[in-house]
Amino acid sequence: MTRRPGPLVYGLLAAFVVGSALPLYWSFVIGSHTKERALETPPPILPGGHFLANASRVLDTIEFWQALLNSLVVSTLCATSVVVFSTLAGYSFAKLRFRGRDGLMAFVIMTMAVPTQLAIVPLFILMRDYRMLDTLFAVALPTLVTAFGVFFMRQYLLEAVPFELVEAARMDGCSMLRTFWTVAVPAARPAMAILFLFTFMQVWTDYMWPLVALQKTETLQIALDRLALTGQGQTTDYALVLAGTAMATVPLLLLFVLSGRQLVAGIMQGALKG
């Protein structure tokens, strides 16, 4: 018989949940008060009644909906591209035998050790030479394929798709692409959902590269940054900033709700295999 989790396990899980939800709750609490109340000591710990008023000020201060649309387009494009190419590459590394496979996989893993910040200057020069600066494609291009995505899908497909199943599909006359589509994709669907979610979050919250690549066009993170500069040298309006931050978190929460079933399925499937 398996032992049920004890109070220590539940206590640690509860502490983890509270710690994870605290930043979102704090953003909503401060964003629901006035500027003066947000600066008081001690700060408020319960929501106030000014969130809608602060949200209206956010919409009047920045082009929130246009920035939201820009971030949605870039994040969806990057997440979809990463899932497609990473699943194809991961299946190739996991189930196909070709010369140099292990060396190429080792090179992909080594690229994960290179800090992202080192590529900003070369990327900026490249985008400038190809006249793509201040476009959404310039923001999306560096994240259309990621080494982590390839490694993640390769590790998942190693266990999710048996070699015998691939060989059986080939004996039935399936081509390589049809074997991938009918055998690998259904098995990899939970991992694809997790990878889509993680990539979407990474691109959605990215600040540094959009700040460098964009001038007049804005993603949501760049637009929210301007909220902190509206005071014109005076005290930052934290109620306004955190109200905008809470509004920017809503699409991520909706994505979690929509992909929750696939996310849980992927975690449970990996746990059962372990």
Image (tube, grey):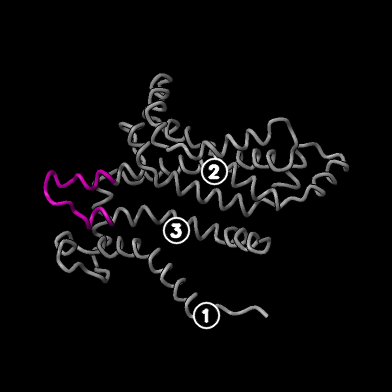
Q: Amino acid at mark 3?
A: Leu
Residue 6 is tagged as: 1
Q: Residue at x 52, y 36 (%)?
A: 111
Residue 153 vs residue 137, the one in the foreground: 153
Which-is-in-front pick, marks 1 and 3? 1
Q: Residues within 10 Å of mark 1 (few under 14, many from 20)?
A: few
State the quadrant of the C terminus.
bottom right
**Left or right placement of residue 154 versus residue 20 in this view:** right
Quarter location, residue 268 = bottom right
Q: Disc 2 residue type?
A: Phe
Q: Of callouts 2 and 3, which one flags the residue occurring earlier in the amino acid sequence? A: 2
Q: Are marks 1 and 3 in contact (CB under 8 Å)?
A: no
Q: Is residue 66 visible?
A: no
Nearer to the camera, 100 or 167: 100
Please tell me in which quadrant of the rendered image residue 215 appears: top left
Q: Disc 3 designates what residue?
A: 253
Q: Residues within 10 Å of mark 2 (few under 14, many from 20)?
A: some
Residue interval drawn in magenta: 225-242
How far is mark 2 from mark 1, CA to CA?
35 Å
Q: Quadrant of residue 135?
A: top left
Q: Secondary structure at mark 2?
A: helix
* Residue 110 point in image, percent of width and height: 53, 37
Give, as a three-letter code, the residue at label 1: Gly
Residue 169 place in picture, x, y as percent:
83, 44
CA separation in Å, label 2 and label 3: 23 Å
**Chain-order first, disc 2 or disc 1:** 1
Label 3 CA crowd tier, 10 Å (few <14, some 14–19, many 20+): few
Residue at the disc numbered 2: 148
